[in-house]
């Protein structure tokens, strides 16, 4: 069962499990993410719908927003996600510490949410993430048509202000458990590997929990299984 509602002129969706476990997952989507009045990419896409079904079957309440489309980590999307969290916590009976699942550019928002609500974050799962917007721009420079389109999207998202979004240090310092899941044969952000490797090494040095999984496109069904296992491991302390 799910409900949609309009908040801050953005459609939001809330999925209810049949047997709630008391924990919630906030999804922060990538470029293809969308929410409409009666549907979303997490319903219409078969693979993503299966992910939601698995999370619901495990007892998780799942929520997300359209987040102004291709926001590229802008402040408007960050504030909206934070306020959406506040609304859900006021209306639903849930543990205040939530899990965050961020895909692609959603990792830019998740990192900024850490600064606003770190004490209310239980864990973060990053799926083929964009950690550094600058590195992604460098990656796409040779694809001239796409690069021009990307630059226009970023200019619109950030009101033509020059931005330097590199969230490496934030994820290194994050005290909560962090999990990377990467599809190795289809990754829009393949040049982020050196940054992810550096984050993992730094977290290990400081004994901060970090998991890292590589998955082939054909084995995407295992993404949610690995994710749920990680979430459950970090629910022993309420």
Image (cartoon, rainbow, N blue to C red):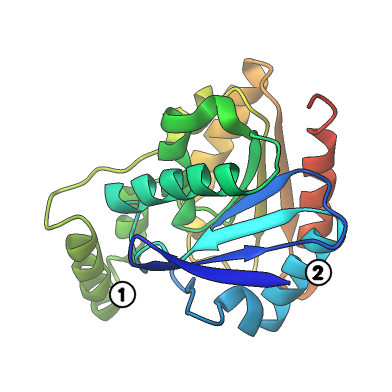
Residue tagged 1 = 143
In which quarter of the view is residue 51 placed?
bottom right
Residue at x 55% of width, y 82% of height: 38
Q: Which mark is residue 54?
A: none
140 in relation to 105, above or below: below
Residue at x 70% of width, y 42% of height: 94
- Which mark is in front, 2 or 1? 2
Q: Position of residue 145 (x, y in %)?
A: 25, 80
Observer-nearest of 236 and 90: 90
Residue at x 68% of width, y 31% of height: 177
At mark 1, the secondary structure is: loop
Observer-nearest of 195 and 33: 33
Q: Is residue 106 visible?
A: yes
Upstream in sequence: badge 2 or badge 1: 1
At mark 2, the secondary structure is: helix
Indicate the quadrant containing the C terminus: top left, top right, bottom left or bottom right.
top right
Q: Position of residue 120 (x, y in %)?
A: 58, 30
Observer-nearest of 185 and 25: 25
Observer-nearest of 26 and 15: 15
46 in relation to 106, above or below: below
Residue tagged 2 = 221
In which quarter of the view is residue 219 placed?
bottom right
Residue at x 17% of width, y 61% of height: 155
Q: Is residue 8 left or right of residue 224?
A: left
Q: Badges 2 and 1: C-beta atoms under 8 Å apart? A: no
Q: Is residue 124 visible?
A: no
Q: Is residue 135 left or right of residue 207?
A: left
Q: Position of residue 233 (x, y in %)?
A: 84, 35
- Point out the residue furthest to the left here: 160
């Amino acid at each position: 069962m799910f409900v949609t509602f309009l908040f801050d002129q953005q459609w939001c969706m809330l999925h209810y499990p049949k047997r709630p476990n008391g924990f919630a997952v906030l999804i922060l989507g990538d470029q293809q993410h969308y929410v409409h009045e009666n549907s979303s990419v997490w319903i219409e896409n078969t693979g993503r719908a299966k992910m939601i079904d698995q999370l619901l079957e495990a007892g998780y309440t799942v929520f997300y927003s359209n987040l102004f489309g291709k926001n590229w980590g802008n402040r408007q999307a960050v504030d909206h996600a934070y306020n959406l969290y506040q609304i859900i916590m006021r209306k639903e009976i849930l543990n205040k510490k939530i899990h965050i699942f961020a895909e692609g550019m959603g990792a830019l928002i998740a990192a900024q949410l850490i600064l606003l609500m770190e004490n209310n974050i239980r864990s973060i799962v990053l799926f083929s993430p964009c950690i550094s917007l600058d590195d992604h721009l460098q990656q796409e420079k040779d694809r001239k048509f796409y690069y021009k389109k990307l630059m226009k999207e970023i200019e619109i998202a950030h009101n033509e202000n020059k931005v330097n979004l590199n969230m490496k240090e934030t994820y290194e310092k994050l005290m909560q458990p962090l999990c990377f899941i990467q599809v190795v044969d289809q990754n829009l952000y393949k040049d982020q590997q050196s940054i992810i490797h550096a984050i993992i090494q730094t977290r290990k040095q400081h004994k901060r929990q970090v998991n890292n999984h590589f998955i082939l496109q054909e084995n995407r069904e295992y993404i949610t299984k690995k994710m749920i296992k990680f979430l459950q491991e970090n629910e022993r302390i309420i």
